């Protein structure tokens, strides 16, 4: 009799555990890797609020919270790409998802991307905001400067600004004035901010491989201003006019300055470098 009671008790406990697990298994988790707010949500309505009409949104439905968070935390390269192994799958999803719908279990969805416009280096009055790449609420841009024969009489410098594949604001032009690599890096950032302001963009993630530009605008400028635009050793700041122009342009902007290693295979940086080199070949006029 005692053995029968023990067996019955084990069966009852097993039934309770099964019931509990079964109930919890009914809940699904919606993972948003790219959207207004990345994270894991328990309802489709919460997920949809983050991805609906968000450019190139990435989201997926999971049965467990662990899998959902693993999807959210999956690394992406600094240029925003997510690798090429699922390129065909992503393209088919873009074509299929003309209207936003709830993903099936384990299905990853991609919001349709705006068709790319043929590159044009001329000034564009207004550009569709959906054509930009976003990091949260911030628009992403890459800048680069170059100078052949830097420091010599025949130096030729150019600036490059890259917003994305075939973007109408992509530009590569000759650097006006003194031809140096550091000036080219600073004025590439200036040009990007000018373009952003013309599009009424207030939040910008600016990638550059120039730590000189980043340190100058985020750390050194304030000290130079207090010292009457002199360095800690009492020398005149060589790039004073360039940093004055850059600082003025940053007013009213929320800019995240991001360093990316140069010539390391990052698409955005490589494209900005290519545009800068093309700009250096142009005449100073």
Image (tube, rainbow, N blue to C red):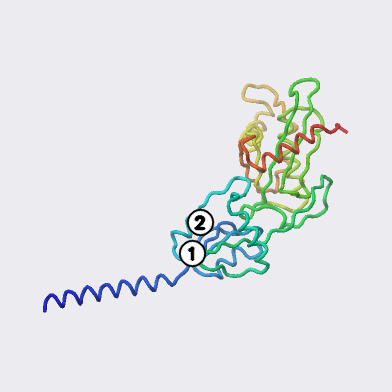
Judging depth in this view, the residue of 9 and 121 nearest the camera is 9
State whether residue 219 is above or below residue 71: above
In the picture as drawn, the residue positioned furthest to the top comes out as: 153
Is 84 left or right of 177, judged from the image as shown? left
Q: Quadrant location of residue 18?
A: bottom left
Q: Classify mark 1: helix, strand or loop.
A: strand
User: Outermost residue, right direction?
Assistant: 285
The residue that mark 2 highlights is: 71
Foreground pick, 10 / 240? 10
**Which residue is more in the foreground, 111 or 84?**
84
- At x 68%, y 43%, the residue is 142
Can you say whether 253 is above or below 68 in the image? above
Instruction: Tell me the element at label 2.
Output: helix
Query: Where does the image place residue 70, in percent across and percent down from the top left?
Result: 47, 55
Residue 234 picture quarter: top right
Left or right of 204 on screen, residue 12: left
Q: How many marks?
A: 2
Q: What mark, if any, has residue 163 been given in the picture?
A: none
Q: Are marks 2 and 1 in contact (CB under 8 Å)?
A: yes
- Disc assigned to residue 62: 1
Badge 2 density bin: few <14, some 14–19, many ≥20, Cα 10 Å? many
Q: Residue at x 71, y 30 (%)?
A: 182
Q: Is residue 82 above or below residue 95?
A: above
Residue 188, position in %: x, y?
73, 38
> Which class describes the residues within 10 Å of circle 1: few (<14), some (14-19), or many (20+)?
many
Looking at this view, name the residue that lies furthest to the bottom: 1
């Amino acid at each position: 009799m005692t053995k029968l009671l023990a067996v019955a008790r084990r069966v009852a406990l097993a039934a309770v555990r099964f019931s509990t697990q079964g109930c919890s298994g009914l809940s699904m988790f919606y993972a948003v890797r790219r959207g207004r707010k990345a994270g894991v949500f328990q309802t489709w309505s919460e997920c949809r609020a983050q991805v609906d009409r968000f450019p190139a949104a990435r989201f997926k439905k999971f049965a467990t919270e662990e899998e959902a968070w693993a999807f959210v935390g999956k690394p992406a390269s600094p240029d925003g790409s997510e690798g090429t192994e699922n390129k065909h799958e992503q393209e088919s999803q873009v074509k299929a998802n003309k209207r936003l719908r709830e993903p099936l279990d384990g299905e990853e969805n991609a919001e349709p991307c705006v068709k790319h416009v043929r590159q044009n280096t001329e000034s564009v009055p207004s550009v569709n905001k959906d054509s930009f790449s976003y990091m949260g609420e911030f628009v992403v841009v890459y800048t680069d400067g170059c100078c052949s024969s830097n420091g010599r009489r025949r130096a030729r410098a150019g600036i490059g600004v890259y917003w994305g594949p075939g973007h109408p604001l992509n530009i590569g032009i000759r650097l006006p004035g003194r031809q140096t690599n550091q000036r080219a890096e600073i004025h590439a950032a200036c040009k990007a901010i000018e373009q952003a302001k013309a599009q009424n963009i207030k939040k910008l993630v600016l990638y550059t491989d120039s730590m000189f530009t980043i340190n100058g605008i985020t750390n050194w400028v304030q000290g130079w201003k207090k010292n009457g635009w002199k360095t800690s050793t009492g020398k005149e700041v060589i790039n004073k006019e360039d940093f004055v122009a850059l600082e003025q342009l940053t007013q009213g902007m929320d800019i995240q300055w991001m360093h990316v290693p140069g010539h390391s295979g990052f698409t955005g940086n490589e494209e900005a470098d290519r545009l800068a080199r093309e700009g250096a070949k142009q005449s100073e006029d």
